[in-house]
């Protein structure tokens, strides 16, 4: 691909932009049909677990075993050819971050990752939606990085897990000497702000760790990695862009967060949320399409989690995006085109 440098337009200053804080990076199996709705037609979606995989699985299981694994509903009579056998999946999920330091100050961010696209010789992530608690971060993401950013409110509530319940859940960790001093549950309610309305997107329940005397040993190894991504093709930035997030952090595997759908926001919650932000509905895309995009993003969040990584002592350096002038034939694929 031929690329060209994009021009910095915001008050963020010159790139690279530095973000410091902590994050949860959770990977999900997302239906390819859902992910393709967000992916431009230039790209081929990375897919796996298709028809042949399911057929081989059926050959190893009898009907009752399949029901026990939840592969089919107990109310559906057995038949070897179901339409869901043709479902294919890609690797998506979400990136939930709390930045203590950034060009926009302290803020929260939820990046909904639709899936992985193939661009030889590497694959890159594609964000379906980006929710941030900062107007400045929203504007920067839209105009300079080409992200589908929206302003949102992040409401957090910490509940202490009873000692008995905590002991049961940490039994295995206790056996191997890796239990933590205190383990609590945090609920993060994400509410998207769209002009005069506030829409509850989801609730994320995750385990948090209260620092103990030997917490440093349990934060996992220090690593460095790069997360390449594509963006753009939005109302605010129609170019197709590519950028990279270079990450330094301490990482460890944790129990996946539980994501649940929320009911519509109450009038009181709407007024309280709107009081903190300036984004207007006129800055967003068509209301009907926005609702469809929200629905698909929620589907990604509610998909099957397979791995969760906690990033502590996070330092993320975001490089200047580059404009991609065209796409190679090997990476082209037709998209369902939701935009």
Image (spheres, rainbow, N blue to C red):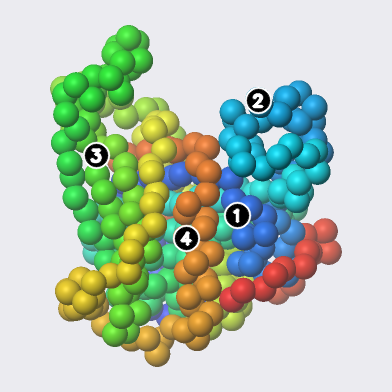
Pick whichever of labels 1 and 2 is earlier in the sequence: 2
Of 336 and 46, nearer the camera is 336
User: Residue at image x 76%, y 46%?
Assistant: 82
**Which secondary structure lies at badge 3?**
strand
**Which secondary structure lies at badge 2?**
helix
Q: Position of residue 209 (x, y in %)?
A: 23, 33
- In the picture provided, is 203 more to the left or to the right than 60? left
**Which secondary structure lies at badge 1?**
strand
- The reply to whether callout 1 and callout 2 are in contact (CB within 8 Å) is no
- In the picture provided, is 198 more to the left or to the right than 306? left
Which residue was labeled with disc 4?
A: 298
How many neighbours does mark 3 have within 10 angstroms: few (below 14), some (14-19), or many (20 or more)? some
- In the picture provided, is 328 more to the left or to the right than 215? right
Image quarter of the N terminus: bottom right
Of 9 and 219, nearer the camera is 219
User: Residue at image x 46%, y 44%?
Assistant: 26
- The reply to whether callout 3 and callout 2 are in contact (CB within 8 Å) is no
């Amino acid at each position: 691909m031929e690329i060209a440098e994009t021009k910095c337009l915001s008050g963020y200053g010159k790139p690279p932009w530095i973000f410091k804080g902590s994050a949860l990076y959770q990977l999900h199996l997302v239906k390819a049909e859902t992910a393709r709705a967000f992916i431009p037609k230039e790209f081929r979606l990375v897919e796996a677990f298709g028809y042949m995989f399911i057929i081989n699985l059926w050959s190893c299981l009898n009907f009752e075993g399949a029901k026990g694994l939840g592969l089919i509903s107990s109310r559906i009579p057995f038949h070897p050819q179901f339409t869901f056998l043709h479902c294919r999946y890609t690797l998506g999920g979400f990136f939930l971050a709390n930045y203590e330091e950034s060009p926009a100050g302290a803020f929260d961010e939820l990046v909904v990752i639709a899936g992985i696209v193939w661009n030889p010789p590497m694959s890159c992530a594609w964000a379906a939606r980006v929710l941030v608690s900062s107007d400045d971060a929203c504007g920067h993401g839209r105009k300079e990085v080409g992200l589908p950013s929206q302003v949102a409110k992040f409401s957090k509530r910490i509940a202490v897990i009873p000692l008995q319940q905590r002991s049961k859940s940490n039994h295995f960790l206790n056996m191997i000497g890796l239990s933590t001093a205190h383990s609590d549950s945090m609920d993060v309610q994400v509410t998207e702000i769209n002009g005069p309305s506030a829409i509850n997107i989801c609730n994320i329940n995750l385990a948090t760790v209260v620092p103990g005397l030997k917490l440093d040993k349990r934060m996992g190894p220090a690593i460095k990695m790069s997360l390449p991504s594509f963006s753009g093709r939005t109302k605010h930035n129609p170019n197709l862009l590519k950028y990279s997030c270079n990450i330094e952090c301490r990482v460890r595997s944790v129990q996946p967060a539980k994501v649940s759908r929320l009911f519509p926001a109450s009038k009181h919650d709407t007024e309280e949320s709107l009081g903190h932000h300036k984004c207007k509905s006129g800055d967003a895309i068509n209301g009907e399409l926005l609702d469809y995009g929200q629905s698909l993003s929620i589907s990604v969040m509610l998909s099957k989690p397979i791995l969760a990584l906690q990033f502590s002592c996070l330092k993320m350096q975001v490089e200047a995006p580059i404009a991609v002038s065209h796409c190679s034939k090997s990476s082209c694929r037709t998209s369902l085109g939701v935009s």
